[in-house]
Image (cartoon, rainbow, N blue to C red):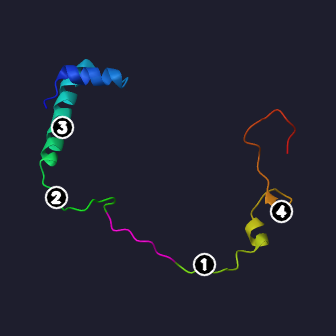
Amino acid sequence: MAINEETVKQVAKLAKLEIEEESIHAFTKEIDQIVDMVEQLEELDTEGVEGTYHGLPQKNVWREDKVQKGTDREELFKNVKTRKDGYIEVPAMFDNGGSEA
């Protein structure tokens, strides 16, 4: 399937892409090469080849779920500038028109 400049212009228009006129020829050539490569891949015999879902072998590493002592709260809060009711107090991100917390 050969890709021509009119096809590239039409696809660019449908995708709402602005491609400069002097770049159309280069895009056409590159897209045509990509389509040719895909067509070559379609010719490969893949009968009996298991599908690949990830490029690297993956396995779950399960560990026993054990309760562990966490970091002391006072140690976590030692560099906090302001705190309120056991939480870190930060400036409001959005002004919802209500009173400050």
User: Range of the magenta residues?
Assistant: 56-62
Q: Which residue is mark 2?
A: 47
From the top left corner, tell me how far across and down residue 70 is, in percent: 70, 75
From the top left corner, tell me how far across and down residue 14 is, in percent: 34, 22
Q: Is residue 27 above or below residue 82?
A: above
Under mark 1, the amino acid is: Asp
Using the numbered discs, state the Cα–Cα distance from disc 2 to disc 1 in whole angstroms: 43 Å
Name the foreground residue: 81 vs 5. 5
Q: Secondary structure at mark 3?
A: helix
Where residue 86 sits, quadrant-wise, is: bottom right
| Contact flag, marks 2 and 4 (Cβ < 8 Å) | no
Instruction: Look at 22% across and 23% down and name the residue there.
Output: 7
Does the magenta run of residues contain 58?
yes
Q: Which residue is mark 3?
A: 35
| Contact flag, marks 2 and 1 (Cβ < 8 Å) | no
From the top left corner, tell me how far across and down residue 39 is, in percent: 15, 42
Crowd tier of the residue under label 2, counting other residues whose Cα lies within 10 Å: few below 14, some 14–19, many 20 or above: few
Residue 77 shows up from this direction: yes
Q: Which residue is mark 1?
A: 65
From the top left corner, tell me how far across and down residue 101 is, in percent: 85, 45
Looking at the image, is mark 2 or mark 1 earlier in the sequence? 2
Looking at the image, is mark 4 or mark 1 earlier in the sequence? 1
Instruction: Look at 86% across and 59% down and name the residue there.
Output: 85
Using the numbered discs, state the Cα–Cα distance from disc 4 to disc 3 in whole angstroms: 60 Å
| Contact flag, marks 1 and 3 (Cβ < 8 Å) | no
Q: Which residue is mark 4?
A: 86
Residue 18 shows up from this direction: no
| Quadrant that contains the N terminus | top left
